[in-house]
Amino acid sequence: MNNDALKISNLYDLNETIAAKVFEDCTYPWEVLAKIGDFIVELGNSLPEDEYEKRGENIWVHRTANVFPSAYIAGPAIIGKDAEVRHCAFIRGKAIVGEGAVVGNSTELKNVILFNKVQVPHYNYVGDSVLGFKSHMGAGSITSNVKSDKTLVHVKGNVDGQSFDIATGLKKFGAMLGDNVEVGCGSVLNPGTIVGRESNIYPLSSVRGFIPAGSIYKKQGEVVTKR
């Protein structure tokens, strides 16, 4: 079947991330997850010193970024221009926080790429995930990145009446959110979730599989197209 809807080119505007190069030679966004750490070190060492301050081992923070004193950042990590990392944020490493992005109070990041203007502003966990330009996770919404039975993650769904099941070969895989996705408060994005551009997830949802672009996810089995 045609899996174009899952491809990087249909989910993300690569002009809206400092990490565009890591997506080269990849077809699907989850293919970058294993590359994020090494890529950050390579990119960080090339960043201009007049724009980025190196803090600790393999941590680069843009001089316009606002990092609260109580935030914890482990490397490798890059915090972009005008980004805000708020009180008690916990960045565990392998994280790129895009230009103008917000990492909120008690939010935890690990092995992620946040495109520019992403907001994970309140009590979010985002692991082994890629969040597209201006995507937003409501308070308490999280990405679940390991299946309960610890088996490898598959991406499943339906496009144009045809079902698909793609083996990713990954044990840890959270969610891929396209540009301008809105996730409602208290939602759980289960391992292998892909949400197409401009889609909305209702609050308190448990989401799994592929949600097409321009959709409203109300509950499992009830996904409608925006008018």
Image (spheres, rainbow, N blue to C red):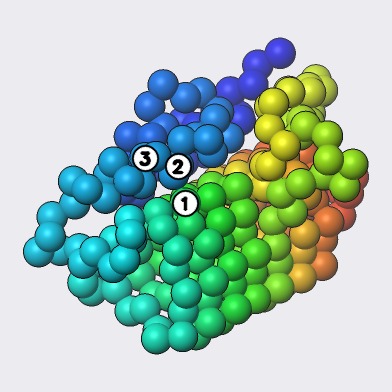
The amino acid type found where label 3 is placed reads Phe
Q: Position of residue 205 (x, y in %)?
A: 82, 61
Q: How dense is the environment of label 2, judged by Cα within 10 Å: few (below 14), some, or many (20 and up)?
A: many
Helix, strand or loop under label 1? loop
Q: Nearer the viewer, residue 127 or 192?
A: 127
Residue at (52%, 76%) from the top-left corner? 89
Residue type marked 2 = Ile
The extreme front residue here reads: 57
Q: Secondary structure at mark 2?
A: helix
On the picture, is 187 further left or further right than 139? right
Q: Is residue 64 visible?
A: yes
Say the numbered circle drawn on residue 39.
Answer: 3
| Residues under numbered marks 2 and 3 in contact, where contact means CB atoms less than 8 Å apart | yes
- Determine the CA span between mark 2 and mark 3: 5 Å
Identify which residue is drawn at 46% across, 85% down. Answer: 70
Q: Of the residues under marks 1 and 3, which one precedes in the sequence?
A: 3
Assign a secondary structure to mark 3: helix
Residue at numbered disc 2: 36
Q: Which residue is situated farthest in the left direction here?
A: 50
Would residue 93 be found to the left or right of residue 196 on screen?
A: left
Query: Dots 1 and 2: beta carbons under 8 Å?
Result: yes
Which residue position holds label 1? 94
On screen, 143 above or below 100? above
